[in-house]
Image: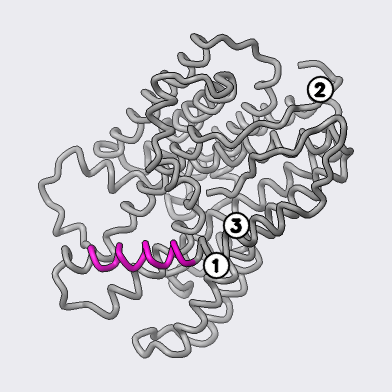
Amino acid sequence: MTDSPTPLPATPRSFVLDGVRGLAIVLVVLSHSWKIWPEDARDGIGSFAALFNSGSVAVSIFFTISGFLATRALLRARDSQGPTSALGWFTRRTIRITVQMWVLLGAVWLMIRFDPTDLATDQVNRESLLSAATYTWNTYVRDHALEARSDIGALYFLGIDVQVLAVMTLLVVAVGKYRRVLGGVVLTALVLSSVWRSVDFAAHGWFHATLTTVDRLDAILWGVAAALIAPKLTWSRERAAAYLGAGTLILLGGILSTAFFGLDAYFTWLGPIIGAATAMMVLGDDGAKGVPTMAGTLWSSDRLSMLGRMSLTIFLWHIPIFEAMARHTPQWHPLPRSLVTIGVLIAVVALVERVVARPVDRLVGSWGRRPSAREPMATTRDKSP
């Protein structure tokens, strides 16, 4: 990598990466489905158990794609319009996520006030909602496991994502001009975090490791590293297809392995493998430049891509809806309860996408977007998950 940055061209939205995120959000939802369909009612499903045990793997997929898209956008903004443009991009991205999350937290607050089945104390509710709203939820849950509200527990993902990308933004602003320096920092952090996660897991257990930012850092750094090396690679259709195909096979193999291995594997050897496989896929997709490949066609299917585009909304709302339905239908059989719950989730996601997510995306996306002669208007935006 040279020390003189080259302005990065704008790229269209990737339906392949949307499809990968579509699979990831399905795995996340399935991993929390025990709230409405208890695990003891799923006996005898064999290897299909992997579909219900892959939540952590799915989070790593989201983290890696987020790191790639965010770093690529930050570098493009810095190279085309100066260091402060990277800060502007990070601000716009954070506002998009924050507005959606605060709408959810507002809905949870209303439920607290009017739902008699919600028995959490005022102090717990106040502290939980405040820490979630300020992206410190992962540390609060880690340190107050028995008090924190469980229906917003998964928001730890957004806290870690924003925390890490805030630091990455500052690095791009400070040393983004010197790609070798930036690459050295990222590579060192990737190696250290990959080792540290297994050490911390062995010392403090899965719960602590799941919620500690440095223990989940490596997945994002795989995406960051991919974004740094992508402009320097020379691609052919065959090479791009090989990256996409190999990454796909490794990723699917990692997902299936969760039927046989637990979190000890994830925090030792499986997590880095998932990060590396996802990085291979985003590099292959970047190199393909929209040219069809077998794996690319698989991932860019309409249904998977649609789920990927709505993954943030699905991620935010699925657990609160699952827990509310479970509290109000304790005597229902798991099958009708699950079907009704999924129907409610689909309706809520469709409403939020139409009324909140898309209008906010259009509004915030127009802020500070003045096309210059050196950079056409970009059409790819990162709204992770």
The part of the chain drawn in magenta is 339-351
Up-down relation of residue 293 to residue 175 (above or below): above
**Quarter of the image that includes the N terminus:** top right
Could you tell me residue 206's position as x and y percent? Answer: 42, 50
Where is residue 142 shown, x and y percent of the image?
52, 62
Q: In this view, does 309 lie to the left or right of 379?
A: left
Helix or strand or loop: what does disc 2 sit on?
loop
Q: Mark 1 points at which residue?
A: 355
- Among numbered discs 2 and 1, the one appearing first in the sequence: 2
Q: Nearer the viewer, mark 2 or mark 1?
A: 1
Principal SS element in the magenta part? helix
**Would you identify the image quadrant in which residue 344 lies?**
bottom left
Let me know if residue 76 is in the magenta part: no
**Neighbour tally class for label 3: few under 14, some 14-19, many 20 plus, Cα within 10 Å:** many
| Residue 383 shown left or right of residue 85 in the figure | left
Give the vertical position of 331 relative to 176 (above or below). Answer: below
Residue at left 46%, top 45%? 308
* Residue, disc 3: 159
Figure quadrant of residue 216:
top right
Residue 92's spot in the image, x, y percent? 73, 54
Residue kind at label 2, given as amino acid type: Thr
Mark 2 = which residue? 6
